[in-house]
Amino acid sequence: MELSKRLKAVADLVSEGRVVADVGTDHGYIPIYLLETKKCRKAFAMDVNAGPLERAKEHITAYGLSDAIETRLSDGVTALSAGECDCVVIAGMGGALTIKIMEEGKSIFQNLKEFVLQPQSELSKVRQYLCENGYVVIAEDMVLEDGKFYPMMKVTNGRSPEYNTIELRYGKYLLEQKHPVLKEFLKKEVQVKGLIMQNLDAQSGAHIEARKAELSRELAEVKEAICFVER
């Protein structure tokens, strides 16, 4: 099984020997890859929709892994029982939905050895939620694929260090690693926000001024982050 760059980076964050539940599995590629590479000894491929789950089942059968990968129709982790797995993967969902799945499945997440998250949006809100709910990020990665940036994180139960605003927005480990893809992302952020600011300069009104002030703060944070990773 050859994965996309994004999905391979997600799979690479899973520790050896785990029993993995892939939430929102879609085609079942991550569980198949983990079993094929013998990184995982058993997996659950789960999706809230029957169509994608059926496709996942077909792929799992084609790879001869039906005995090792169980498919389950599940809204988040509702079809899991505590102790059935020790790692959950949630990749490709919005930040708000990621938080919702975790909040509704607390009894599962609080008993995991680790879980891997790759939210598509609201990264700072996800990181804040983790900090405030007894979870700690232990590793991060970021890839660029087809013009899109994908940050991801490995999380476990534990006490999180305090995050400042920039760490919440861009990732404490990514900043400390001076991650090359993060550098590229930050430079693009300066360009995008600068262009928005130029367009706003031609407009007027209280809401425009409020937006410009917000953008100025965001630009200052991005530039501070760039200074940090380029030291």
Image (tube, rainbow, N blue to C red):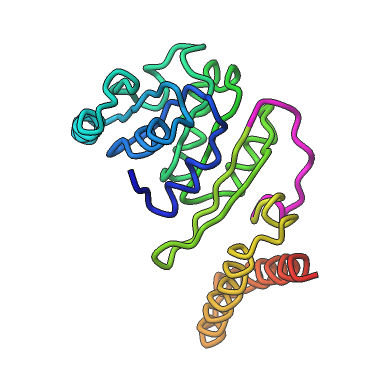
Q: Residue at x 43, y 36 (%)?
A: 37
Q: Which residue is drawn at 67% across and 38% down?
A: 137
* Image quarter of residue 15: top right
Residue situated in front as seen by the camera: 227 or 30:
30
Q: Residue at x 69, y 27 (%)?
A: 134
Q: Is residue 90 magenta?
A: no
* Image quarter of residue 155: top right
Seen in the image, is 210 located left or right of residue 165? left
* Image quarter of residue 189: bottom right
Q: Which residue is drawn at 29% across and 26% down?
A: 65
Looking at the image, residue 174 lies above or below residue 200: above
Q: Where is residue 48 in the image (x, y as percent from the top left)?
A: 30, 29
Seen in the image, is 64 located left or right of residue 34? left
Which residues are drawn in magenta? Answer: 156-169
Q: Position of residue 169 (x, y in %)?
A: 64, 54
**On the rendered image, what quadrant is the N terminus found in?**
top left
Residue situated in front as seen by the camera: 8 or 134:
8
